[in-house]
Amino acid sequence: MLQRWFRLFWVAWLVIGLLGLVYLPGGQARTLAQQPTVAIATVTSSPFGPMATVNSDQDQINVRGGPSTDYPIVGVLVAGQRVPALGRSAGGDWVQISYPGIEGGVAWVYSYLVTVNGELPIIEPPATPTPRVTPTIDPTLAAQFVIEMVPTRLPTFTAPPPVIAPTFTEPPSQTNAAGVPMGFIVIGMGAVGLFGLMISFFRGR
């Protein structure tokens, strides 16, 4: 009797299982049948395309609104920072980068301060910004700073007096009436005196 009830129990469970497979929704059955048995690799986002890297010898560089120093500074980049590069100017001196946080999301950096990997297309620069207020000069105020230089009279040239060169005359030579120089006469008289002195000396001995 117990074996009979045990067999009926297993037959009932078998019938219920078959009916469940028959009436199970097709979409759910396909979903259960397509469950993967291996791990699916996840996709991670990474930068792609040309990148501009700030050179290591620069502490920081200016980011401008256009490819010229006439454009305002909209931010800075520090050494080693990498940003997506979008294009370059016609001369190649400036590089357009992606710079979120400003109007348009793009800006420009000087190309010699960054290193770009990849080719960049040429991009037309934006219009040069015009100053909001055009400075005007107050003529009344400007007139106060205008200094009129009064011309000075040049000195007149007066010719110097003529230079008179002094002339010197030769002194007359000291000669006697006979035309003999006085020096010879003095020497001759000294020689005669010396000769007389020697004679007197020898006589006294």
Image: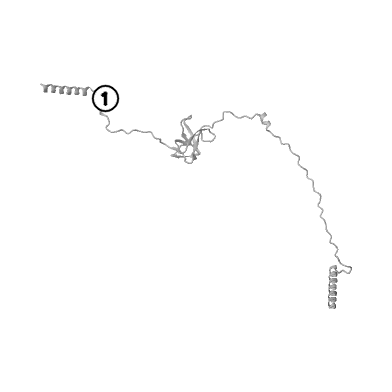
Circle 1 is placed at which residue position?
Answer: 28
Q: What amino acid is at disc 1?
A: Gln
Q: Nearer the viewer, residue 11 or 26?
A: 11
On-image quarter of the C terminus: bottom right
Residue located 17% across and 23% down the image? 13
Q: Position of residue 10 (x, y in %)?
A: 15, 23
Q: Position of residue 37 (x, y in %)?
A: 27, 32
Furthest-left residue in view? 1
Q: Position of residue 30 (x, y in %)?
A: 26, 27
On-image quarter of the N terminus: top left
Q: Is residue 13 visible?
A: yes
| Disc 1: CA contacts within 10 A as few (<14), some (14-19) or many (>=20) | few
Horizontal side of 183 relative to 50 (left or right) equals: right
Furthest-right residue in view? 177
The local secondary structure at tag 1 comes to helix
Place residue 148 in its image quadrant: top right
Q: Nearer the viewer, residue 135 or 91?
A: 135
Horizontal side of 156 relative to 45 (left or right) equals: right
Q: Is residue 110 visible?
A: no
Q: Nearer the viewer, residue 147 or 131?
A: 147
Furthest-front residue in view? 205
